[in-house]
Structures are given as C-alpha cells and as structure tokens.
Image: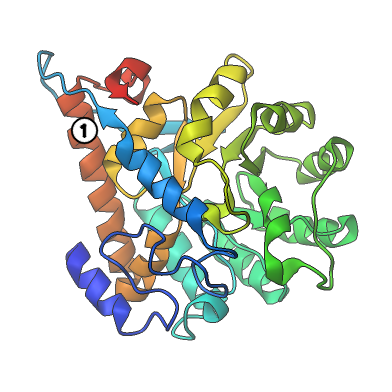
C-alpha cells in the first residue's frame, strides 16, 4: 500500500464532509462543521497551509554524508520522529460511521506506538469519546496523550481521573476548543480559562501538562505561569476563528519568548509533509502535531495506512535534513530556512 492507495480507499468510506484531497489544504472543506472544516469562511485553515508552503529551505550538500538521526525526547520518553498524531474526537460525527471513537483510537494509538511516535486523542460532548480514547492509550502501555476539552472544573476533574488511569505520559487541554460552535451552550459547558483556573487544572494532571491552542507571546507566557510543561502553537486547525494568523507566522516570536524556559514547544496547523516538519523545527518548535491526514490514513488503510503515512513523513524529513546539512534535530537551525 502506498499513500495514493490510502487516499483512494479513504474516499470510499470517509463520509460526505472530507474529500480525502491529495493536498489537505482546507479549501474543499473550508466552511463546514461537522467535518474537518471550519466555522465562517475557513480562511485560517487555508492560511495555515499556505504559510508553511511559502517558507523555503536552504539546500547545502557541502557537508559530511550520513543517515540523519530523527529521534526526539519528550518528557523522558524517546520517539523515533519529532511528529505526533493530533487529537480528533467524535469521528462518526465529523467523518463517517465506518469508525467509532473506540475503533478509531484503537487503530491510531496502537499504530502510532508501534511505529515510534505517539497519538494525541480527542474529547467530545459524548463522554464515551474520552472513555474510549483513554482505554486505547491504556492498551498501548500509556503511549498517548489524552486531550481534554476546556470544560467546567467538575467535568475536567472526572476526565482527568480517566486520563491518569490510562498511564499516559502527558495530558493536554485544547483551550482553543472554546471557540467550537458545537461546544457552545452545551452540557457540560466549555469555555476559556484564566491563568488561575489553568494552574488548578495543571496540578490535577500530576504529570507533564500540555496547553494546546496558544497563538501569542502573551498566551505562551500565561501558559508558562500556570505551570504548563509544553504548549502547542495552534489555532485549532483554523476551525474556531476566521482572520487568525497562521501558526507559521507566530511560531518564531513565541519560540523566542520561551527560550531557556524549559517549556517545550509543539506546533500544528497545515503541516502536511516532512519538509514542513523540518521548517517548524527550524523556526523553534521541538516537535509538531499533524491531525487531519492521520484521519485519512486510518479510514484509508487502518494500521497499515497509519504506518504508510508515518513512513512518508519520516522519509521526507530525513531527506530534507540530509539535503540541508543537519545530521540530528539539534543541528536544524533558523538559517536553514528562508521566510
């Protein structure tokens, strides 16, 4: 199976919203929710993709030859590659009932763990989403990151207990999910968090806590103040607010602001190739998240589809490192890209 096969297979069963496009750039699904799209006109998702594409890499093959080391360490765990599968919940709502949250996470979490990375799992208005996600992580020996929506504190406490019971190595909260239309006026309620509220949630985790949905230096410093071990520079894939900057546009200034702080920096939004992963690392990220293409990979090939996509991104990353003179992730520097 190759990636073209994965896309062809996915188109037969992924549902009416996602088109399993050869280039996942947010254009075909730009203004629809449910589905992989966005509220409003969907211009932020498109901008995410386009801004990574505008960044160029500086080729330099006048260097020692060798196989690049793509390994990365995060919170004491070593991974084969510096990219992870992003969280998605309620797949039968947003895609099709070919998969449920249990079967989707069972495939994704296990396949990612077996191929050297980890999956972030999603949450939703249906409590079974978190239940099934944490069961899958537990079955994979804790190799996964449950991502909790910004619910009220009582709901967060209950979901946090589920997350910790899975043995996960870290827990995340996608604070930007406060802008999702299907979470507004729902029970339980979800919404933005103050620094004090976030600090309380961080303490509940009792392990590294990742704040996903940071788009400003101010927000990054707030997350640090609350005790976050890591942030994800993210606008929720462009799904929650039109007219946002792309993640590639704000990553450098956020990375500079957190330099030397010990807070790890991840980034998502429109990252679709191993070359994009390289660009993100050069701009200051420690690792990246990729979400929508992993959904396509599961629907298009199950565990084999996930492995196919991981291998594709990994090969592209290694090739770019080799062609730009980086033998390890630590050797990827800002001067290797041109904005």
Q: Nearer the viewer, residue 280 or 143?
A: 280
Q: Examine the image and state in which quarter residue 260 appears.
A: top right
Q: Which residue is tagged 1? A: 320
Q: Examine the image and state in which quarter residue 149 appears.
A: bottom right
Residue shown at 48% from the left, 72% from the top = 104
Q: How is the image coloured?
A: rainbow
Residue 65 placement, left or right of 294: left
Residue 70 placement, left or right of 227: left
Q: Locate the N terminus by quadrant.
A: bottom left
Residue shown at 39% from the left, 40% from the top = 51
Residue 152 placement, left or right of 180: right
Q: Locate the C terminus by quadrant.
A: top left
User: Is 189 drawn above or below residue 253 in the view shown?
Assistant: below
In the rendered image, residue 73, in percent from the top left (x then y), is placed at 46, 31
Residue shown at 60% from the left, 44% from the top = 169
In the rendered image, residue 283, in percent from the top left (x then y), is placed at 42, 26
């Amino acid at each position: 199976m190759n990636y073209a096969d994965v896309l062809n297979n996915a188109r037969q069963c992924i549902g009416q919203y996602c088109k399993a496009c050869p280039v996942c750039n947010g254009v075909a699904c730009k203004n629809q929710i449910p589905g992989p799209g966005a509220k409003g006109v969907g211009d932020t998702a498109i901008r995410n993709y386009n801004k990574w594409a505008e960044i160029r890499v500086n080729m330099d093959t006048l260097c020692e030859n060798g196989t690049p080391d793509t390994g990365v360490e995060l919170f004491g765990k070593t991974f084969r590659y510096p990219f992870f599968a992003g969280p998605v919940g309620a797949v039968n709502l947003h895609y099709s009932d070919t998969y449920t949250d249990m079967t989707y996470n069972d495939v994704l979490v296990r396949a990612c763990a077996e191929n050297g990375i980890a999956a972030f799992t999603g949450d939703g208005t249906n409590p079974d989403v978190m239940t099934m996600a944490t069961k899958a992580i537990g079955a994979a020996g804790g190799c996964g990151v449950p991502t909790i929506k910004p619910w009220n504190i009582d709901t967060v406490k209950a979901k946090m207990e589920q997350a910790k019971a899975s043995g996960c190595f870290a827990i995340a909260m996608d604070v930007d999910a406060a802008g999702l239309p299907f979470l507004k006026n729902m029970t339980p309620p979800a919404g933005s968090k103050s620094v004090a509220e976030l600090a309380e949630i961080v303490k509940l985790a009792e392990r590294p806590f990742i704040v996903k949905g940071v788009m400003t230096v101010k927000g990054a410093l707030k997350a640090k103040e609350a005790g976050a071990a890591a942030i994800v520079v993210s606008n929720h894939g462009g799904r929650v607010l039109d007219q946002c900057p792309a993640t590639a546009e704000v990553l450098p200034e956020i990375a500079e602001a957190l330099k030397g702080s010990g807070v790890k920096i991840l980034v998502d939004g429109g990252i679709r190739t191993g070359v994009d992963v390289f660009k993100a690392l050069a701009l200051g990220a420690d690792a990246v998240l990729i979400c929508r293409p992993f959904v396509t990979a599961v629907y298009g090939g199950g565990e084999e589809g996930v492995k196919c996509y991981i291998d594709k991104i990994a090969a592209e990353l290694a090739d770019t490192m080799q062609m730009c003179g980086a033998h390890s992730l630590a050797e990827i520097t800002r001067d290797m890209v041109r904005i």
